[in-house]
Image (cartoon, coloured by chain):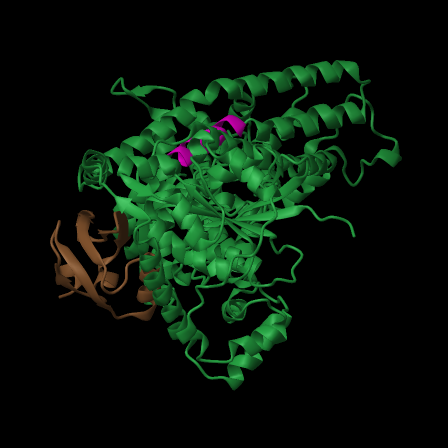
C-alpha cells in the first residue's frame, strides 16, 4: 500500500520510495526504507499529512506520499 | 607569518538552535546588514576567546547533508568545498539537536570526512531531558574521536566550554565514515590528489560544484570535476544516495548503546495535543487569523506612541536648527529637505520592530511551520507551497528580508513565483501612504459602534494586496512549467518556548539594517530639495534668489518634471504635484509622504506650519478650482500604491536572488502595469 492510504495513528514500515528527488530528501530526514513511521496529522482539506519518524514530525504532501510504498506494522 | 584569526563555522541541521549558539558566542558583535539590497548569506560575528585571541564565528543556514537541494543549503556547501578559499574554516563547530542525534549524525560524518577539525556540540540538552533521551557523551566522544560539549544555548549553558575548546589544539578527525562501496565506483583518490585535497571524500563532495556556483563564477575545481566526470561515467545521484544510506547504517550501529530512550509520555502527549488543535480544520484557521489580528492591532495601536514621539522630536529639531542657522539655502536644505525626509522614514522603526518581534517569536516557537502546514494546499493551488507562507507574511513588514526568506524552497518554480508576488503584500513602507490617503477620504467614525471605518479600509488594503499576490501567483503558475517532481517535504520542529534574548537580537539587527536605508533617503531628500528649489530660470548663480521667497513650485525643475508626466497620469486623476511624488517615490514608497510635505510646505508660505492633511484637503485645481483630492483620485492613488513596484531595494534583492535581469524586469513591469491599469479603472469608475 501507499503512505497516503494510511489512517490517523496507523504505524507502518517503509518498503520503497519511488521518486528519486523525494527519496533523497526523505533519506536526509532519516526517513528511509525499513524505517517505522506513524501517520500523526492530516491537514485541513486532507493535504498535506505529517508522519512521525524517530520521534520527530515530517510533513509531506499527498503527491509525495503516493511515491512511498509501506506495509502496516 | 602573521597569525590569521581563527575561523569557526557553525554547521548543522535546520532547527538545532544554531542561531542561539551564534548569538550566545558573539552577542551584538555581528557583521550583518541584510537590508537595502545588501544580501548577506552567512552571518559573521566576533567571539572573544579565553586566551585573549578573537575568533570569527560563521553562522550558516541549516542543511541536512552536503548535497544541496535549495539555495539555502548551497551556502554551507560553497564554504566547504574549496579548501583553498580564504573563507575556508579552521574548525567546524557541529551543532546537533540532542533529541535527534541519529539524523544529525549524517551531516556530522560528512563534515568529519572532509578532514577539518570538528567539535561536536550537543545542543538542546534540556529538551532531550524532557523528551526522555539519554546520551552517553563520554562514550560517544571516544568512539567518534572528537571533543563533545553539551549545551543549552537558551540558558547559555556550555558556552564557556565551547570558547575554551576553540583555543585547544585541534586535530582533524579520522575520516572513517567514507563509504568504500561508493568510493570504488571511480578513482576519487586521483581526483583528490589532482585538486590537492587531503581526503578522498572532499573530491566526492566537489562533484556537485557545478550546480552550486554563483552566476558567472569561475572555478578551477569545477573545470577539473567536469573533465573527471567526462572520463569516468557514473550516476552521481545514485552514488550520493548510497553514500547517505551507508552512513545511516553505520550511525545506527555506532549509536547503539550510546543513546537510550525513556519516553516522557506526558510531555509528548502535550506536544501532540498542541498539534491537533493548531492544525485543526476549524480551530487551526481561527487561531491563525486571531494571531494575525493581534499582530496587526498591536502594530497600529502600540506603535503609535513611539511614532508620535519620533515625529515630535524631529519637529523640535527642525525648529531649533532653523533658529540656529542663518536664513538661507543651507537652513532651507536641512529643515525643509533632509530632516523631514529622514523623519518620514525613521518613524517606521517602531512598526518594523514590532513586526519582526512577532515574526521571530512565532518562528522561534515552531508555530510558523504549522502555518505552512495549514496553508500548503491553498498555496499550492496558485503555484506556491506551504513554505511560501512565511515569505508572504514577512512581506507585510518588508519585501527585502521576505524575498531572502524564500531560500529554503527547493522547487525552483515555487521559489520564483513566491519572489515575484511577495512585493504585492502591503509592506510597512506603504503604511504611511495609506494612512495619509485614508485619512483624507474616509471619515474617522465607528461602524456599528465597534469598528473604526478607517481601520477597516486599512485592513481592506492588506487583504487587497494578499488577494493580488494569490492572483498573480496563479497567473505565473499557468505560464511557468513545473520541472521538479518533489512537491513539499518539511520538518515540523517541536514546540519550544521562544527565547526573548534571541528575538531581541534579531529585532535589533533588522532595525540596524533598516537605518542603513537612511542614506538613500538623505540622498533623495537632497535631490528633491534641489529640484524643487531651483529651476531653469532660477539658479543660484543667476543671483535672483532672495532669502525668504521661494520660486513658484511649478517653475522649478521638479515642477517641470511633474508637468511633463502629467498627460500620462491625468486619466488616473492625478495632477503634476502627485506626479512629482510618484517619481520621487519610485526609489522608495514612503518618500510619497515626505515629498508631499516638501511640496506643500514649499508652495504655501503663509501656512507653513499647518498639517499636511489639511493642506491637501484644501488643495484646488489651478484650472477648474475643484478640489484635487476627490474620493476618486484618492481611491485611484491607493490602488496605485498598493500595486506599484516602487522600491529599489526590492528590485535589487529580486535581481540577486533570481540572478536574472529578465525576471527583475518582469516583476517591475507587471506590477507597474497592474498599478496603472488598476488606478485608471478605479478613477474612471468613481469619477
B161 or B392, nearer to the observer? B161
Q: Is residue B113 above or below residue B192?
A: above
Segment tinted magenta in the rendering:
B349-361
Which color has been applied to chain B in this rendered view?
green
- Say which quadrant the C terminus of chain B sits in: top left
- When the figure is inspected, residue B462 is found, relative to residue A13, above or below; the finding is above
Chain A tint as drawn: brown
Q: Quadrant of residue B346?
A: top right
Q: Position of residue B363 (x, y in %)?
A: 38, 38
Q: Position of residue B323 (x, y in %)?
A: 76, 13
- Residue at (58% x, 32% y) in the render: B28
Does B387 lie within the magenta span?
no
Query: Is residue B359 highlighted in magenta?
Result: yes
Q: Residue at x 59, y 66 (%)?
A: B198
Vertical side of B143 occupied by B502: above or below: above
Q: Position of residue B636 (x, y in %)?
A: 44, 40
Q: Position of residue B576 (x, y in %)?
A: 60, 39
Residue B470 seen in render: no
Query: Is B41 rendered above or below residue B595?
Result: below
Q: Residue furthest bottom?
A: B231
Amino acid at each position: 500500500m501507499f503512505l497516503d492510504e494510511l489512517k490517523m495513528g496507523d504505524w507502518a514500515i517503509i518498503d520503497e520510495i519511488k521518486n528519486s528527488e523525494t527519496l533523497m530528501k526523505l533519506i536526509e530526514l532519516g526517513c528511509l526504507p525499513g524505517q517505522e513511521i506513524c501517520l500523526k496529522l492530516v491537514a485541513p482539506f486532507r493535504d498535506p499529512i505529517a508522519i512521525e519518524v524517530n520521534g520527530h514530525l515530517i510533513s509531506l504532501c499527498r503527491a509525495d506520499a503516493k511515491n512511498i510504498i509501506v506495509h502496516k506494522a | 607569518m602573521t597569525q590569521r584569526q581563527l575561523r569557526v563555522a557553525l554547521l548543522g541541521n535546520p532547527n538545532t538552535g544554531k542561531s542561539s549558539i551564534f548569538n550566545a558566542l558573539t552577542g551584538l558583535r555581528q557583521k550583518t546588514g541584510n537590508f537595502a539590497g545588501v544580501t548577506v548569506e552567512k552571518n559573521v560575528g566576533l567571539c572573544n576567546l579565553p586566551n585573549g585571541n578573537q575568533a570569527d564565528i560563521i553562522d550558516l543556514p541549516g542543511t541536512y547533508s552536503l548535497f544541496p537541494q535549495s539555495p539555502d543549503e548551497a551556502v554551507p556547501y560553497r564554504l566547504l568545498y574549496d579548501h583553498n578559499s580564504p573563507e575556508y574554516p579552521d574548525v567546524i563547530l557541529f551543532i546537533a539537536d540532542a533529541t535527534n542525534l541519529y539524523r544529525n549524525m549524517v551531516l556530522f560524518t560528512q563534515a568529519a570526512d572532509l578532514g577539518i577539525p570538528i567539535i561536536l556540540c550537543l545542543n538542546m540538552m534540556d529538551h532531550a531531558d524532557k523528551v526522555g533521551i539519554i546520551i552517553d557523551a563520554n562514550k560517544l566522544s571516544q568512539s567518534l574521536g572528537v571533543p563533545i560539549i553539551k549545551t543549552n544555548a537558551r540558558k547559555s549553558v556550555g558556552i564557556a566550554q565551547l570558547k575554551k575548546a576553540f583555543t585547544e589544539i585541534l586535530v582533524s578527525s579520522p575520516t572513517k565514515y567514507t563509504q568504500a562501496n561508493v568510493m570504488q565506483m571511480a578513482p576519487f583518490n586521483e581526483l583528490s590528489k589532482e585538486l590537492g585535497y587531503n581526503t578522498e571524500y572532499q573530491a566526492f563532495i566537489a562533484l556537485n560544484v557545478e550546480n552550486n556556483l554563483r552566476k558567472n563564477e569561475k572555478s578551477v575545481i569545477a573545470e577539473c570535476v567536469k573533465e573527471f566526470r567526462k572520463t569516468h561515467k557514473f550516476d552521481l545521484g545514485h552514488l550520493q544516495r548510497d553514500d547517505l544510506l551507508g552512513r545511516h547504517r553505520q550511525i545506527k550501529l555506532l549509536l547503539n548503546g550510546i543513546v537510550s530512550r525513556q519516553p516522557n509520555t506526558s510531555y509528548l502527549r502535550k506536544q501532540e495535543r498542541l498539534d491537533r488543535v493548531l492544525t485543526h480544520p476549524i480551530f487551526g484557521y481561527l487561531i491563525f487569523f486571531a494571531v494575525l489580528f493581534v499582530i496587526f492591532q498591536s502594530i497600529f495601536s502600540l506603535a503609535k506612541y513611539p511614532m508620535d514621539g519620533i515625529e515630535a522630536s524631529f519637529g523640535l529639531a527642525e525648529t531649533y536648527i532653523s533658529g540656529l542657522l542663518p536664513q538661507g539655502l543651507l537652513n532651507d536644505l536641512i529643515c525643509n529637505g533632509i530632516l523631514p525626509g529622514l523623519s518620514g522614514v525613521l518613524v517606521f522603526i517602531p512598526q518594523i520592530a514590532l513586526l519582526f518581534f512577532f515574526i521571530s517569536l512565532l518562528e522561534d516557537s515552531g508555530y510558523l511551520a504549522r502555518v505552512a502546514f495549514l496553508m500548503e494546499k491553498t498555496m499550492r493551488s496558485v503555484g506556491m507551497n506551504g513554505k511560501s507562507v512565511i515569505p508572504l507574511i514577512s512581506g507585510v513588514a518588508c519585501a527585502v528580508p521576505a524575498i531572502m526568506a524564500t531560500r529554503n524552497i527547493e522547487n525552483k518554480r515555487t521559489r520564483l513565483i513566491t519572489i515575484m508576488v511577495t512585493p504585492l503584500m502591503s509592506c510597512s513602507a506603504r503604511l504611511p501612504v495609506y494612512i495619509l490617503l485614508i485619512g483624507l477620504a474616509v471619515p474617522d467614525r465607528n461602524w456599528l459602534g465597534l469598528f473604526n471605518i478607517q481601520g477597516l479600509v486599512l485592513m481592506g488594503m492588506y487583504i487587497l494586496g494578499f488577494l493580488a499576490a494569490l492572483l498573480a501567483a496563479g497567473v505565473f503558475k499557468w505560464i511557468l512549467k513545473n520541472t521538479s517532481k518533489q512537491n513539499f517535504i518539511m520538518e515540523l520542529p517541536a514546540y519550544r518556548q521562544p527565547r526573548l534574548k534571541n528575538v531581541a537580537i534579531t529585532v535589533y539587527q533588522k532595525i540596524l539594517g533598516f537605518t542603513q536605508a537612511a542614506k538613500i533617503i538623505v540622498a533623495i531628500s537632497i535631490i528633491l530639495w534641489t529640484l524643487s528649489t531651483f529651476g531653469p530660470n532660477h539658479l543660484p548663480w543667476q543671483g535672483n534668489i532672495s532669502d525668504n521667497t521661494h520660486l513658484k513650485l511649478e517653475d522649478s525643475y521638479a515642477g517641470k518634471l511633474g508637468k511633463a508626466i502629467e498627460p500620462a497620469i491625468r486619466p488616473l486623476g492625478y495632477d503634476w504635484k502627485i506626479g512629482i511624488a510618484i517619481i520621487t517615490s519610485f526609489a522608495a514608497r514612503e518618500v510619497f509622504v515626505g515629498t508631499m510635505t516638501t511640496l506643500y510646505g514649499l508652495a504655501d508660505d503663509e501656512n507653513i506650519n499647518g498639517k499636511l492633511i489639511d493642506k491637501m484637503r484644501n488643495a484646488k485645481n489651478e484650472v477648474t478650482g475643484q478640489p484635487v483630492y476627490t474620493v476618486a483620485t484618492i481611491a485611484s492613488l491607493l490602488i496605485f500604491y498598493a500595486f506599484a513596484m516602487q522600491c529599489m531595494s526590492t528590485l535589487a534583492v529580486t535581481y540577486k536572488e533570481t540572478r536574472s535581469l529578465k525576471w527583475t524586469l518582469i516583476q517591475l513591469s507587471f506590477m507597474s502595469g497592474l498599478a496603472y491599469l488598476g488606478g485608471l479603472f478605479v478613477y474612471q469608475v468613481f469619477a
